[in-house]
Amino acid sequence: MPRSPGEANVRRPTNVTLPVELVAEAKALQVNVSQACENGLARSVAEARRARWLEENKEAIDAHNAMMDRDGLILDEFRHF
């Protein structure tokens, strides 16, 4: 989803439930729990977007791959490697 330039800085307070031992270790190691949660969530969102894109475009990707298998690369005859 596109965001406006200033939108990335807008924060929303959110409660999360985490294992007590993990939070204690993070604090002992001076890990910023909010930043760590944000990084993990961003990774999960990126993976979900990728999976969705691949699923939505599966038919086109399969058709392209089939064409490459059948016809070879365009201009392949001019490659010198």
Image (cartoon, grey):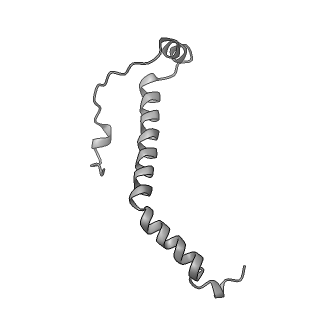
Tell me what residue is drawn at x 72 percent, y 79 percent. Answer: 81
Q: Nearer the viewer, residue 75 or 27?
A: 75
Q: Quadrant of residue 12?
A: top left
Tell me what residue is drawn at x 42 percent, y 35 percent. Answer: 41
Picture coordinates of residue 62, whole percent (x, y): 49, 67
Tell me what residue is drawn at x 29 percent, y 48 percent. Answer: 5
Residue 78 versus residue 4 in the image, above or below: below
Tell me what residue is drawn at x 40 percent, y 49 percent. Answer: 49
* Residue sitting farthest toward the bottom: 77
Picture coordinates of residue 33, whole percent (x, y): 45, 22
Q: Quadrant of residue 11?
A: top left
Q: Quadrant of residue 45?
A: top left
Count numbered badges in the picture.
0
Q: Nearer the viewer, residue 45 or 70?
A: 70
Q: Nearer the viewer, residue 57 or 3?
A: 57
Residue 40 versus residue 1 in the image, above or below: above
| Left or right of 37 in this view: 10 | left
Residue 80 versus residue 16 in the image, above or below: below
